[in-house]
Structure formats: C-alpha cells, structure tokens
DNA sequence: AATATTAGTGGGTAACTACCAACTATTGGC
DNA sequence: GCCAATAGTTGGTAGTTACCCACTAATATT
C-alpha cells in the first residue's frame, strides 16, 4: 500500500512529513528523559547561548507570543530551572537567568537531542547528514 | 535578533521549521489558485495515480481516518471533482472516480505545486534540489 | 442461520499552536 | 508633568490534526 508518486515526488510533502515525524520523536524523548517540552528546551538554550535576558527578548528570538512566554517561564521557574528577577535598570523587565539545575538539565537535554538525531538521521551517512543540514539551513529564513 | 546556535545547529529543528513554512506556503497558494486543500489535492492525486478506488483505500494510502475521509470526499463530490458509485461487486464499497473537472483541476494544482516549489526551493541550485529530495526521501518511512 | 468482519457515516473530542484584547506597572519623549 | 510606548500578565479564542465511539449496510465465515 504505497503513497502516490505525485506526493512522493513533491519535495515539500516529503520534507514536511519527515520534519513532523522527527520533531515528534524528539519531543517524546525529550519529555520522557528530561521532562522538558521542545519550547522549554529552546528557552533554556536561548538563555545559555545568549546569557540572561528579559522575558520578551527570549520570546522575540523564538518567535513566541509574549503571553505564551509567561506561561512557559512560569513552568521553568517552579521547576527551579531559571530565576526571574527584576532588572534594576528597568524595573518593567525581568532578568531571566539559568540556575545550576537549569544548566545541568540543559546539558542532559542536549545529549538527548544529539542521541535522537543520531537515530532519526540513521539512514544517512555522516556526509549526507552534514549536507542535509546545510541544505535546510539555506532554505531557512526566520 | 538571531536564533540560538543550539537550535540552528539541530537538524530536526531547522528541518521542521522549513517543512512547516513550505507546507503553509503551498497550502495557501493551492487554495487561492484552485480552491483545493492539501488533503484534497492528495486525494485527487491518489485517484489519478492509482485509478478509481474505494474510499477506504484512498484513506489508508494517505493515512487518513475513515471518518475524515468521508468529509473530505463529500467536498470533492459536491464540487464535481469526483463521483461516488457503489462497487457492483461489493456494494459496501464505493468506486470513487475522477471527473473530467477533477482531472483538469488536478492538472492546474500540479502546476501550482511545481510553481510554489520553484519559489520555496529558490535558494538551492537544481542539483541541490534533487539532492535534498533524495535525502529526505531516504529519511521518509511512512 | 448465526456470527464476525468490513466500508462507510455521523458526532464528538483532546492536544496543540498560534493568536488577540485588555489590563498594570514602569519608563521615555516632549 | 503629560502622553506614548514597553514589559509582563490574564483570559480567552480559532484552527488544525488526529483521533475515538457507535451505528448501518453489506459481505464473509463457520
């Protein structure tokens, strides 16, 4: 029982299917092994890559609505992965920082991500994986 | 305002973003130019590629729930793109066939798809597009 | 003949994503 | 000092996707 050639021949179709399947696999393993959602992982990674930042800055970077950002950060706070202090220079803003636990959880999450990618990209050789990454990066315009 | 390197370095992340963006672009142009949804296009393509079939067969092929298939087919029927006749050999089944209008709409849709892919894959050379298609096809296990 | 299975239907839901409007507290521009 | 803009918050909605259950009509199994 095969899919129609018309769809298999459409790059967008196959690309989307693979993207969704891989993301789903990643999300499942991430929550199972670290308790993080994909967005939580993204937020932790943002804080680690760029250092402490205002809540809105993280949201803007990830393309997340401010209101959704609040709820996401609430989660990180009461799991003790990040702290929320008022920026003394501008008391409207927060200064969100990773805690030690946050950094440690992020490291475990990075390992899980690498692990899952090894699995989902298993049909490709190392050179092909690198090439795929370059190709999709060229297509990616945020 | 850039995305964190951790995410940009994750193939799954970029792949998913590109997949969703491309699919969204395709869906928008398809409905604008032909009135078809992506699933309707997929169903028409299935019928054209494999010939007349039972409703369930099309649904199985596309991985669509039978109940959703009914609603999708209802749409194709009352737009005159397909016909629904009982299979005389097994009167539980339908025999879904493309109408002339259905075939004609499908051809226009194929042109739109090719057109949109030219746009969304514009950052790649022809060789790169072919390679990308091969790579994602290797990753695609339905 | 009785029972199980299959094709198609109708109705409904749960999760997720992505929004939007309205509000408070604070700051910056004039 | 006054007004506009910004950071964060709360509450809510719309669309999509992917289901599930209960039902009928017809066929297959035994």
Image (cartoon, coloured by chain):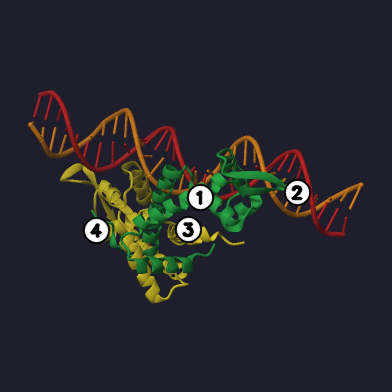
Chain colours: A green, B yellow, C red, D orange
Q: Position of residue D5 (x, y in %)?
A: 75, 54
What is the tally of numbered marks visible in this picture?
4
The crowd level at tag 2 (other Cα within 10 Å; few <14, some 14-19, many 20+) is: few
The crowd level at tag 1 (other Cα within 10 Å; few <14, some 14-19, many 20+) is: many
- Circle 3 is placed at which residue position? B17
Q: Chain of mark 3?
A: B
Q: Chain of mark 1?
A: A
Residue beneath the point at 37% across and 76% down:
B127
Q: Is B114 placed above or below A96 here?
A: below
- Circle 2 is placed at which residue position? A88
Q: Is residue B38 visible?
A: no
**Mark 1 to mark 4: distance in Å?**
48 Å
**Mark 3 to mark 4: distance in Å?**
32 Å
Q: Chain of mark 4?
A: B
Q: Is label 3 in contact with label 2 (beta carbons under 8 Å)?
A: no
- Circle 1 is placed at which residue position? A106
From the viewer's side, name the closer residue of A64 and A120.
A120
Q: Quadrant of residue A67?
A: top right
In this image, B23 relative to D12: left or right? left
Comes first in the chain, label 1 or label 2: 2
Of badges 3 and 2, nearer the viewer stands 2
From the viewer's side, name the closer residue of B84 and A104.
A104
Circle 2: element type: loop
Q: Are marks 1 and 2 on the same chain?
A: yes
**Mark 2 to mark 4: distance in Å?**
67 Å
**Mark 3 to mark 2: distance in Å?**
36 Å
Q: Position of residue A48 (x, y in %)?
A: 57, 54
Q: Are marks 1 and 4 on the same chain?
A: no
**Mark 1 to mark 2: distance in Å?**
27 Å
Q: Are marks 2 and 4 on the same chain?
A: no
């Amino acid at each position: 029982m095969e899919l129609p050639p018309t769809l298999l021949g459409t790059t967008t179709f196959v690309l989307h299917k693979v993207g969704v399947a891989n993301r789903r696999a990643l999300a499942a393993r991430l929550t199972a092994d670290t308790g993080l959602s994909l967005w939580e992982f993204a937020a932790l990674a943002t804080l680690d890559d760029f250092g402490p930042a205002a809540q809105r800055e993280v949201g803007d970077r990830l393309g997340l609505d401010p209101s959704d950002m609040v709820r996401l950060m609430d989660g990180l706070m009461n799991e003790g992965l990040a702290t929320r202090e008022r920026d003394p220079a501008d008391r409207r803003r927060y200064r969100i920082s990773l805690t030690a636990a946050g950094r440690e959880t992020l490291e475990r999450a990075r390992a899980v991500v690498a692990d899952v990618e090894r699995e989902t990209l298993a049909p490709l050789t190392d050179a092909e994986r690198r090439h795929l990454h370059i190709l999709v990066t060229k297509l990616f315009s945020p």
